[in-house]
Structures are given as C-alpha cells and as structure tokens.
Image (cartoon, helix red, strand yellow):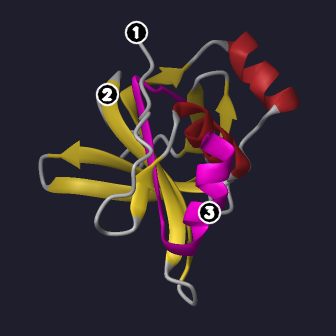
Amino acid sequence: MGRTGSAQYGLAGNGSHELHLRECVELLASGTVGRVAIGTPRGPHIVPVNYVVDRESVVFRTSPYGVLGRSAWPCRLAFEVDEIDPASSSGWSVVANGLAERLDDPVEIGTLRAFRDPQPWADGIRRMYVRLPWDSLTGRRVGAALGRGRAEGS
C-alpha cells in the first residue's frame, strides 16, 4: 500500500499551498484531537476523537456501541486535523484516508496503552481501538501560515 503526499509548492490563486508529505506527518503528529468521517446509510457522519500517530497510521479509541463501533470492519475512513487562526485568516489542515481496522490483538493494544495510548476526553467507556493506516495523506496551508510552511518544505 503506497503512501502519498503532495509535492506542489506553487501558490494557488487563493493564497494557499499544498503541503509536502513530511509536513503532513509532522502536523498530524503534533495534534491530539481530530475528526473521523465515515459514510453511513443516512449520510456522512463526523466524530471528534483524541488520537495518536503510530508509525504510518492514526490510532484512536471509541465506544463499541456508537456509529463507528457498529460499523462493518474493516471500513474506509477519512480523518482530519487542523489549526486555524481567525485573527490572521491563516491555518493548516491535514487529511488522512485509508482502510481502518479494529484492533483486537492484546499485545498491540498493550503496547499502545503503555507508550502511546490516545486518552479520550469524552465521558463513557472508549475501549475499542481503531487503526487507520493512511493510503493518502494530504494537507494545505492558507494565509499568514504560508511563510513557515514554505521555509520548512523547501
């Protein structure tokens, strides 16, 4: 399964640019809260989750009784994390897409719990672990944040 990222660095007409794969991974790894999107028979459903980046995947915990937990596994998911500054009309966004899987291996779950356990902020029991290995990872910077991204990605 190949990993993709954007290598385009020219400014678009809207004052934005696509991020290099390395920048996408760094920004994704710097966050703790993102949004998971899943298609359901009733339409798209988006859930905020706490997450960690583990190797080339996003890992989060959820309830086995919610929309995500009741999904057929493996399933295709999108995951987004971003940071915005309304005062300067700037920010960035990174989106990971891939075929997510439920984690059932006690050794893998034990390792995650010991070293990289995503700690949910939401009330309730979130004991179901989900791994989303990305097959597509893309990102974009807009506004004043462009200067940092262009210098880092050059």
Measure the alpha-carbon separation of dots 1 and 3: 33 Å
Quadrant of image for the N terminus: top left
Which secondary structure lies at badge 3? helix
Q: Residues within 10 Å of mark 1 (few under 14, many from 20)?
A: few
Q: Which label lies toward us, 2 or 3? A: 3
Identify the residue at image location x=56%, y=27%: 57
Q: Image quadrant of residue 51?
A: top right
Q: In this view of the protein, can residue 125 be seen by the observer?
A: no
In this rendered view, identify the residue nearer to me: 88 or 114: 88
Give the mark, 2 or 3, whose residue is nearer the N terminus. 2
Quadrant of image for the C terminus: top right
In this rendered view, identify the residue nearer to me: 4 or 29: 4
The amino acid at mark 3 is Gly
In this rendered view, identify the residue nearer to me: 23 or 131: 23
Residue stretch in magenta: 129-154
Q: Mark 2 — residue?
A: 75
The amino acid at mark 1 is Met
Q: Mark 1 — residue?
A: 1
